[in-house]
Amino acid sequence: MGDYLRDFSWCPREARFIVTVEDARSYYAHKLVGERTIAVGGAPLQIVFNREEIHPFTEAMKAGETCPPTHLVRRPGSSEVRRFNLERAHMLDDILRTLSSAAVIHEARHGGGRMVYGPADPKARRQCVVVAPGNRGVWFVRTAYPVSGMDFAQVRRHGRSARWPP
């Protein structure tokens, strides 16, 4: 699984060029990790990508499920193991765009977080970015994943609306 905390000497120019787990880790480390200010509704908002986060380019595995060892991703300092997801990795470029131009916002299940849904793409798919609040108005990106048009219709009917920016 490699040493996630090592320095990467190369990363893809854009997320759409990611092919492997190492590409995704390198891209995430070079292009996203750290704090950035984005404009949301004309107001500045602090967004943080933690270095150890793996959820934006991986997916959970069901009990007893297996996958190729090259697709296993372990979060540093944790026993959590997830599977590399190329579709999620290709959407890494869309995270900040989704947060800046949210279409629908719902309360997340835990800790005052938000589930921020971006506009639909040509296939009616949307990205959902889950963020959690920190101190001093900072928001931490926890995960991001694609949502089909059908799944989004369900979410829209049953989710609890929330403000963004809060």
Image (tube, rainbow, N blue to C red):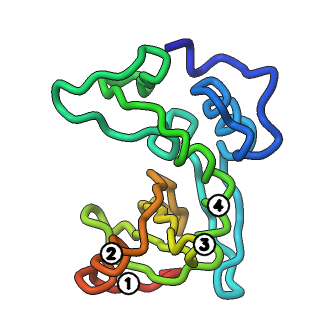
Q: Residue at x 65, y 42 (%)?
A: 33
Q: CA distance from mark 1 to mark 3?
A: 22 Å
Q: Amino acid at mark 3?
A: Asp
Going from N to C along the chain, the mark reached first, 2 or 1, is 2
Above or below: residue 89 compared with residue 155 = above
Residue that label 4 marks: 94
Tag 2 residue: 107
At a point 29% along the width and 63% down the height, the residue shown is: 111
Q: Amino acid at mark 1?
A: Ala
Cα separation, mark 3 vs mark 4, equals: 11 Å
* In front of the other: 164 or 137: 164
Closest to the camera, between mark 1 and mark 3, is 3
Helix, strand or loop status at disc 1: loop
CB under 8 Å between callouts 3 and 2? no
Mark 2 touching mark 1, by CB under 8 A? yes
Q: Residue at x 38, y 84 (%)?
A: 162
For marks 4 and 1, give the CA distance. 21 Å
Badge 4 marks a residue whose secondary structure is helix
Asked if residue 68 is positioned above or below residue 146 in the image, the reply reads above
Position above or below: 113 against 91: below
Which amino acid type is marked by label 2? Glu
Asked if residue 72 lies left or right of residue 3, the reply is: left
Residue 126: x percent and y percent?
51, 69
Q: CA distance from mark 4 to mark 2?
A: 20 Å
Callout 4 amino acid: Asp
Which numbered dot is residue 95?
none
Point out which mark residue 162 bears: 1
Label 4 CA crowd tier, 10 Å (few <14, some 14–19, many 20+): some
The answer to whether mark 1 and mark 3 are in CB contact below 8 A is no
Residue assigned mark 3: 121
Ranked by sequence position, the earlier of labels 4 and 2 is: 4
Placement of 106 over or under 141, stated as above or below: below
